[in-house]
Image (spheres, rainbow, N blue to C red):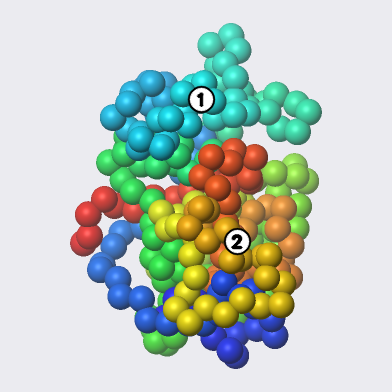
Amino acid sequence: MLGATRSDESFVFDNEKWAHPAELEPFAIARAPVTQAEFAAFVEGGGYGRREFWSDEGWTWRESASAACPVYWQKRDGRWQRRHFDCWVPLEPHRPVLHVNWYEAEAYCRWAGRRLPTEAEWEMAAGWDPVDGRKRRFPWGDEPPATERACLDWAGGSGAGCVDVAAFPEGDSRFGCRQMIGNVWEWTGTGFGPYPGFVVDPYKEYSEPWFYTHKVLRGGCWTTRSRLIRNTWRNFYEPHRRDVWAGFRTCAKDSL
């Protein structure tokens, strides 16, 4: 059942309403988001210059932006660095790549022989409890986020930023997926659109104007306030946006 139920929260956005059946084939999803080291291998392998890894829209964007690496990366003295606020720091190999857009995520997946998860797959991996036969509010259960479970509330590494993808094992979902809440927003392969029976809420500018032009992101990031996030919350941005605190995780290309 994809989406929020009427008993989940005191408030949900109109684009989360309401839970409805979503039939899925068996799938394999990565335990953690793609790391900086993994994405660097794509960059070093010429991924930005190889047309076969890019969709038509993605290649048009790449050429117009003259993109050859993530927007806040640079190579100095033969080593990659990334911009962290007003500083340049060496890549942290085990931290998630971030500030990549949907086109870059899609191209990486093609290079790696993988794909982006659909938002239904993402929500199932984050929230479904096969033991109890129900959906959880958060990957770890129904208890609200705590500092030992998720990187939220501007409390990341060294006081501000992402943490290694192996951190926060207490926040794992029932399927062993880590950091599906916090650290980085995660692009999905799904275009942002209404759920069946959608009715616009009084704040009509929130969702409806952006249907069919944006892509869905899930899970929150290290700057997200813990009082706001949950498994069913849908974020959405245009696929060319590189300023979002966003990364991604991948799925096996074929069903199990």
Q: What residue appears at the point 38 percent right and 26 percent down from the top-left corner?
A: 47
Q: Nearer the viewer, residue 105 or 84?
A: 105
Question: Which residue reaches farthest top?
Answer: 77
> Which quarter shows the C terminus?
bottom left
Residue 75: image quadrant is: top right
Residue named by callout 2 = 209
Give the side of residue 46 with respect to residue 160, left or right.
Answer: left
The picture places residue 62, in percent across and down from the top left corner, at 47, 28
Q: Amino acid at mark 1?
A: Ser
Residue 144: % across, % down: 67, 75
Residue toward you, 64 or 176:
64
Which amino acid is tagged 2? Pro
Task: Tell me the element at label 2.
Answer: helix
Q: Which element carries disc 1, helix, strand or loop? A: helix
Residue farthest toward the bottom in the current orientation of the protein: 7
**Disc 1: CA contacts within 10 A as few (<14), some (14-19) or many (>=20):** few
Q: Which residue is mark 1?
A: 64
Q: Is residue 223 left or right of residue 192?
A: right
Which tag is nearer the camera, tag 1 or tag 2?
2
Tell me if residue 81 comes above or below residue 7 in the rendering.
Answer: above
Question: Is 144 displayed left or right of 237 in the figure?
Answer: right
